[in-house]
């Protein structure tokens, strides 16, 4: 590298890659149910699409993690979105396509996709 | 670029590597690939996490789950349960990471929560072999700031005002050293890094080089800019192979990225550095001996002045600092004088890394603000003395330091308070002793070390330490006389006053400080011919207690046939014939034989 600007740019990019070791709980957390019920209902492709989307959109401060069975196995795949200062939103019956839409609408633009939430399903 | 949802950090420090953490890494990578998780989960080999007691250590982010003493066969469970299903494997967590109900992340564990990490900031967090991870955590920003916004004088002013003192042991003000080297006249100057860590039990310099080598490179470049030097040398012992390898990788990466070499960051400043390997002589930690060794001469100290700042490497002005001192510099540049001064005490700002060892629960590396009381280090962070034993003393400063007793446990630790107690900071070894440690034997152990390591140049150290060792051996073997104690004290003071370099001047410290605080133990050895701690075998006798079932095992293994007794009756030992080999004690299945 030849300049301070270049160094700063590298820092920005690298930080996104390893941010999850540093900023604990400050960014958005997406928790995917990955118990046996979730996996058999297709949670893995959902998780992968979330990761791909986060990668594509450069969302370094978004953490995608998994959890065990949430309890409503009939609605799997399920994931929950925790945004700082906002109430938890639970999305149910997810598919990779729906997950991408949530990523764009909710995570990036801040609009909850009501039709996919557990409230709408009940 | 790939964003991973989870990072598995595996400790690659020397401690965990020797307990096979390299195999763990391969196993993790294998299984992660097998489960098709390699695009989501990244495996990173880091430097030392510090809690070596719990090694090999594996941390899984983003949860910060702290797995300890992981075996090869445990890996599958972590991959299957945690990485695939997101269920933390409680069974394998570090015991301090589980409270009543909740699982604590690594940051919430007592051992880490009570520390303040500056020099060890990146150790166990980043991969030392990836310059991008260092840059991500503000790496090289301190250097960039200095090169683009500050004059060399301003850099020195910041270091001076920060109050940083040499972490290698003597505590000399770092800014003053930089100032001397900057003012020295000469067409060529050198920046040297002293990584010849030799104290038995101290390993902070090794851990910094293994865990965060770029911080040292950045700081040395900064020093080069400040004093007007374009060439640095790191003098590190060859017996630190992992540290040497990672430092070399880091130097290569910095060169490749243009952070070492010509015209750094387009500012016109040139700086490069090389590694020089030492053969592991303790005396080469002394700066003039270190310089002689880099020059290819025999590593022996010389008289000062002239100081290295004026006539150092190849007679040119040279700046020499210790690894840990350098590791603080980039942080000071970035966060400023006020931040650094807000940590620690008035005369010793910042933190110090200590290597906790001996009779303590949490063996490992801890970094604490200066001024922290010893009690907090030993009990709150170190976890106290194992097996319910009584604390007796803590030895600081290794073979150059002394002992601190229970009476002084509440002393805030800084450079000056330790000297006032007759010990010293040293490079930061902290060996905890309990009631079972014999203080005379401890003094003998350290003297044994200095006799080995004395370079032989000056008479007081070469001959004097040898004679001291002989007296101490005599005392521990029960052949000591009352006059020996005074002789020892006189000899110690003479060696201290007359030796050429720091090695000889401080070699008597373990003797003087144990004499000061534990004179009664010396007297017990020479007058009563007993060892109160029960360590000096020559002064102890073996006895058979009434736990004896009369199995005759001991009598059968005794090489001098001094144990008598009938089958199914309590046996006895004839102490006049006993050669104190201990074979009977090992053979007894009922723990009936004791030393007294």
Image (spheres, rainbow, N blue to C red):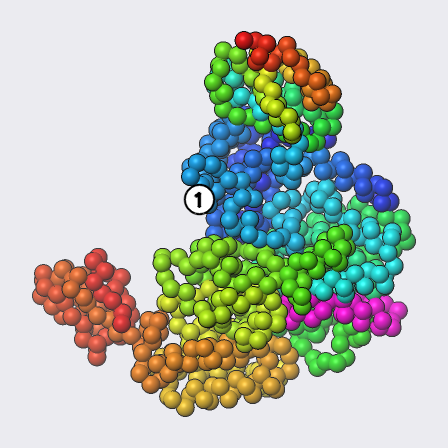
The stretch drawn in magenta includes residue B184: yes
Residue at x 52% of width, y 59% of height: B377
Height in image: A65 above or below B505? Answer: above
Can residue B20 be seen here?
A: no
* A49 left or right of B384 in image: right
Q: Mark 1 points at which residue?
A: B95
Magenta highlight range: B165-190
Height in image: B504 above or below A60? Answer: below
Can residue B41 be seen here?
A: yes
Residue at x 39% of width, y 69% of height: B437
Label 1 environment density (alpha carbons within 10 Å; few <14, some 14–19, many ≥20):
some
Image coordinates for residue B11, horizontal then vertical, percent? 56, 45
Between B421 and B467, the one lying in front of the other is B421
Image coordinates for residue B48, horizontal then vertical, percent? 58, 50
Image coordinates for residue A112, horizontal then vertical, percent? 67, 17
Image coordinates for residue B259, horizontal then vertical, percent? 80, 49
Height in image: B244 above or below B533? Answer: above
In the rendered image, which quarter is residue B204 located in?
bottom right
Residue at x 38% of width, y 78% of height: B521
* A44 left or right of B143 in image: left
The stretch drawn in magenta includes residue B590: no
How many marks on residues?
1
Residue at x 58% of width, y 83% of height: B496
The quarter of the picture where the C terminus of chain B appears is bottom left
In the rendered image, which quarter is residue B315 located in?
bottom right
């Amino acid at each position: 590298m030849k300049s301070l600007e270049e160094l700063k740019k590298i820092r920005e990019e690298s930080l996104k890659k390893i941010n999850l070791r540093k900023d604990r709980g400050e960014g958005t957390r997406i928790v995917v149910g990955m118990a046996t019920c979730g996996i058999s209902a297709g949670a893995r492709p959902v998780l992968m699409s979330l990761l791909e989307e986060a990668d594509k959109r450069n969302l370094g401060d978004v953490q995608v993690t998994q959890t065990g069975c949430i309890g409503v196995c009939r609605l799997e795949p399920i994931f929950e979105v925790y945004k700082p200062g906002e109430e938890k939103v639970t999305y149910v019956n997810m598919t990779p396509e729906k997950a991408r839409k949530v990523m764009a609408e909710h995570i990036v633009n801040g609009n909850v996709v009501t039709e996919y939430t557990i409230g709408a399903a009940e | 670029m790939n964003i991973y949802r989870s990072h598995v950090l595996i400790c690659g420090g020397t401690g965990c590597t020797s307990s096979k953490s390299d195999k763990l890494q391969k196993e993790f990578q294998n299984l992660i690939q097998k489960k098709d998780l390699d695009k989501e989960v990244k495996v990173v080999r880091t430097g030392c996490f510090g809690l070596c007691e719990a090694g090999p250590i594996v941390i899984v982010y983003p949860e910060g789950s702290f797995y300890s003493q992981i075996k090869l066969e445990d890996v599958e469970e972590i991959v299957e349960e945690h990485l695939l299903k997101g269920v933390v494997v409680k069974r394998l967590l570090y015991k301090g990471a589980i409270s009543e109900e909740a699982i604590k992340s690594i940051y919430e564990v007592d051992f880490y929560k009570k520390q303040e990490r500056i020099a060890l900031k990146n150790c166990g967090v980043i991969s030392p072999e990836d310059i991008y991870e260092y840059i991500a955590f503000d790496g090289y920003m301190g250097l960039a700031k200095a090169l683009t916004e500050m004059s060399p004088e301003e850099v020195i002013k910041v270091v001076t005002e920060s109050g940083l003192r040499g972490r290698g042991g003597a505590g000399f003000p770092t800014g003053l050293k930089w100032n001397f080297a900057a003012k020295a006249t000469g067409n060529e100057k050198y920046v040297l890094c002293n990584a010849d860590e030799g104290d038995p039990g101290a390993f902070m310099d090794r851990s910094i080089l293994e865990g965060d080598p770029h911080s040292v490179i950045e700081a040395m470049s900064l020093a080069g800019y400040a004093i007007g030097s374009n060439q640095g040398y790191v003098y590190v012992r060859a017996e630190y192979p992992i540290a040497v390898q990672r430092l070399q990788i880091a130097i290569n990466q910095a060169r490749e990225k243009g952070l070492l070499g010509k015209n750094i960051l387009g500012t016109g400043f040139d700086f490069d550095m090389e590694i020089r390997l030492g053969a592991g002589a303790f005396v080469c930690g002394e700066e003039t001996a270190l310089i002689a060794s880099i020059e290819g001469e025999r590593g022996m100290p010389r008289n000062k002045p002239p100081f290295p700042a004026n006539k150092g490497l190849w007679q040119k002005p040279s700046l020499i600092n210790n690894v840990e001192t350098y590791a603080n510099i980039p942080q000071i540049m970035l966060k400023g004088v006020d931040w650094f001064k807000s940590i620690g005490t008035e005369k010793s700002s910042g933190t110090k890394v200590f290597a906790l060892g001996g009779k303590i629960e949490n063996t490992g590396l801890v970094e604490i603000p200066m001024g922290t009381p010893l009690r907090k280090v030993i009990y709150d962070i170190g976890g106290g003395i194992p097996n319910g034993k009584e604390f007796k003393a803590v030895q600081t400063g290794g073979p150059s330091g002394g002992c601190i007793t229970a009476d002084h446990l509440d002393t805030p630790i800084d450079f000056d308070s330790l000297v006032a107690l007759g010990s010293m900071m040293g490079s930061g070894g902290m060996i905890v002793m309990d009631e079972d440690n014999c203080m005379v034997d401890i003094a003998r152990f350290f003297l044994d070390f200095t006799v080995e390591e004395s370079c032989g140049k000056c008479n007081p150290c070469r001959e004097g330490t040898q004679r001291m060792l002989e007296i101490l051996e005599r005392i521990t073997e029960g052949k000591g006389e009352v006059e020996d104690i005074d002789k020892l004290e006189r000899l110690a003071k003479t060696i201290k006053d007359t030796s050429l370099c720091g090695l000889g001047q401080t070699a008597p410290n373990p003797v003087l400080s144990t004499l000061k605080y534990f004179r009664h133990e010396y007297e017990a050895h020479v007058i009563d011919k007993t060892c109160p701690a029960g360590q000096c075998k020559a002064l102890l006798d073996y006895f058979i207690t009434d736990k004896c079932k009369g199995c005759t095992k001991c009598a059968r293994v005794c090489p001098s046939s001094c144990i008598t007794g009938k089958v199914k009756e309590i046996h006895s030992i004839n102490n006049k014939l006993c050669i104190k080999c201990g074979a009977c004690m090992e053979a007894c299945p009922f723990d009936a034989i004791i030393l007294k």
